[in-house]
Image: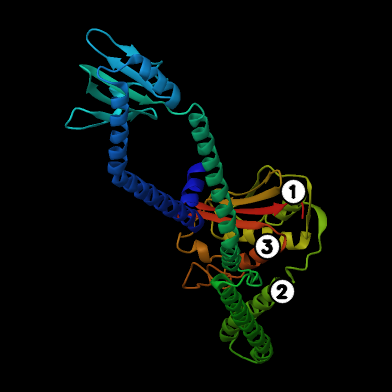
């Protein structure tokens, strides 16, 4: 579970944009640092020349061989540590700075034998003089390390603050994208009445406006389609009634029964279309009551006692839930009818069970029938969709049952999920929230 979340995090536009800004900032910082380093090395030659001139003055002041007394006077005035190494005698004006190590120092060697470099921030010059080696060490100021550490802390805090401001600014700037994603999810679930706020003055506002326009046009198109279907179905009722009357005057009994069967099927289809449309429009108007869904499921299963294979009740939850009992009865009846219809009469029984969660109640209807192809599952909740493209009378139905179930469950603020494997069976989970 954690890995998909991390994958989504690194694949998000927001994260990529933030990482791009961070990378650009680091690249600019490194460019500036590299420029300062190049400038420093470029100006080091003149600095070293001036420093060597100053050392020449010091050597003249110390004499040859160098005077220890004079060296101590210079050390007191300048803060330098002067050391003289000679095979016969040597001296040192004071202790070397802490962590100073000549063997691990950064050294620039000159052809004359002079060494110039630094160790742990302490600069030095070593050269041959007076038959020995004279070493000048300029210690770093005692508060320099604390100052450097304080500056590093300030820089780290400043960088963190800048990144935090950038994070929240980008999050606010890309907020419309999250709203747009939610709108796409709602539209994909069939809720075309959802609109996203048209905030801001950027291209994202234009994108939100275009999405709302698209959703409105799709909604109008679907309403027009449903209205056309309702009008046609309504108009068909009158000629069907006249056909039924005319059939009674036929003298050929066999032809009369055949035509009567066809007319009855047409009438059943028209009635199903009109009833489905009526219930879909009324699905959002719920008559909520405190209902024991476990008892309701048990009573409904008894209505199918004459159908094969039988219905086997699993664990049921006898806890009141705020639902519309008649509409939930329709949902369960449609699901059980589908499960029985697509399971052989001599097959395993259809199971109906419930599972109580902290915030929701799950109703599970499962069968071990013929199953549904994976390509058909995304379309099962669309009106008039049937996996059986031949629409044979043997399979029955008009593809309206699951569409109606989804409309009712959505009106309750719940969800309906279907999974199936061909040859193994189908499992439908209806999730109803315990509180609204």
Q: Nearer the viewer, residue 43 or 396?
A: 43
Instruction: Tell me which label, 2 or 3, sits earlier in the chain.
Output: 2
Separation of marks 2 and 3 at Cα, in angstroms: 12 Å
Residue 17 in percent (x, y) is at 47, 57
**Discs 2/1, front:** 2
Q: Find the residue positioned furthest to the left.
A: 111
Label 2: state its secondary structure. Answer: helix
Q: Residues within 10 Å of mark 1 (few under 14, many from 20)?
A: some
**Is residue 340 something one can see in this rendering?**
no
Left or right: 336 in relation to 17:
right
Q: Nearer the viewer, residue 153 or 365?
A: 153
**Is residue 199 something one can see in this rendering?**
yes
Mark 2–mark 1 contact, CB under 8 Å?
Answer: no
Residue 291 in percent (x, y) is at 80, 53
Q: Which mark is residue 206?
A: none
Q: Which residue is mark 2?
A: 281
Q: Which mark is residue 410?
A: 3
Colour scheme of this structure image? rainbow
Where is residue 412, by image quadrant?
bottom right
Q: Which residue is mark 1?
A: 294
Q: Residues within 10 Å of mark 3 (few under 14, many from 20)?
A: some
In the displayed structure, 138 sits above or below 361; it is: above
């Amino acid at each position: 579970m954690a890995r998909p979340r991390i994958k989504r995090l690194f694949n998000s536009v927001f994260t990529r944009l933030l990482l791009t800004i961070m990378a650009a900032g680091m690249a600019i910082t490194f460019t500036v640092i590299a420029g300062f380093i190049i400038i420093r090395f470029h100006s080091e030659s003149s600095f070293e020349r001036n420093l060597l001139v100053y050392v020449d003055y010091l050597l003249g002041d110390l004499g040859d061989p160098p005077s220890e007394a004079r060296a101590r006077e210079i050390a007191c005035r300048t803060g330098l540590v002067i050391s003289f190494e000679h095979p016969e005698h040597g001296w040192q004006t004071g202790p070397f700075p802490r962590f100073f190590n000549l063997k691990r120092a950064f050294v620039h060697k000159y052809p004359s034998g002079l060494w110039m470099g630094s160790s742990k921030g302490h600069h030095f010059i070593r050269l041959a003089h007076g038959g020995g080696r004279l070493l000048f060490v300029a210690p770093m100021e005692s508060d320099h390390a604390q100052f450097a550490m304080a500056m590093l802390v300030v820089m780290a805090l400043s960088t963190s603050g800048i990144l935090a401001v950038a994070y929240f600014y980008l999050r606010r700037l890309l907020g419309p994208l999250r709203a747009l994603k939610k709108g796409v999810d709602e539209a994909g679930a069939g809720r075309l009445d959802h609109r996203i706020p048209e905030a801001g003055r950027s291209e994202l506002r234009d994108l939100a406006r275009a999405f709302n326009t698209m959703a409105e046009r799709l909604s109008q198109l679907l309403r027009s389609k449903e209205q056309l279907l309702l009008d046609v179905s309504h108009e068909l009722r009158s000629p069907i009634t006249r056909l039924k009357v005319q059939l009674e005057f036929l003298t050929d009994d066999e032809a009369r029964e055949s035509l009567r069967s066809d007319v009855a099927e047409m009438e059943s289809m028209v009635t199903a279309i009109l009833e489905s449309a009526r219930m879909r429009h009324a699905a959002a108007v719920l008559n909520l009551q405190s209902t024991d869904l476990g008892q309701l499921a048990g009573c409904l299963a008894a209505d199918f006692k004459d159908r094969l294979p039988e219905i086997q009740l699993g664990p049921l939850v006898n806890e009141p839930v705020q639902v519309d009992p008649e509409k939930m009865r329709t949902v369960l009846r449609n699901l059980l009818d589908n499960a029985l219809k697509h399971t052989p009469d001599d097959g395993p029984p259809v199971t109906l069970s419930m599972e109580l969660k902290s915030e929701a109640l799950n109703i599970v209807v499962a069968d071990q029938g013929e199953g549904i192809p994976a390509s058909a599952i995304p379309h099962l909740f669309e009106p008039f969709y049937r996996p059986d493209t031949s629409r044979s009378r043997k399979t029955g139905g008009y593809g309206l049952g699951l569409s109606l179930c989804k409309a009712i469950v959505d009106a309750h603020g719940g969800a309906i999920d279907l999974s199936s494997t061909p040859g193994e069976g189908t499992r439908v989970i209806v999730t109803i929230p315990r509180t609204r």
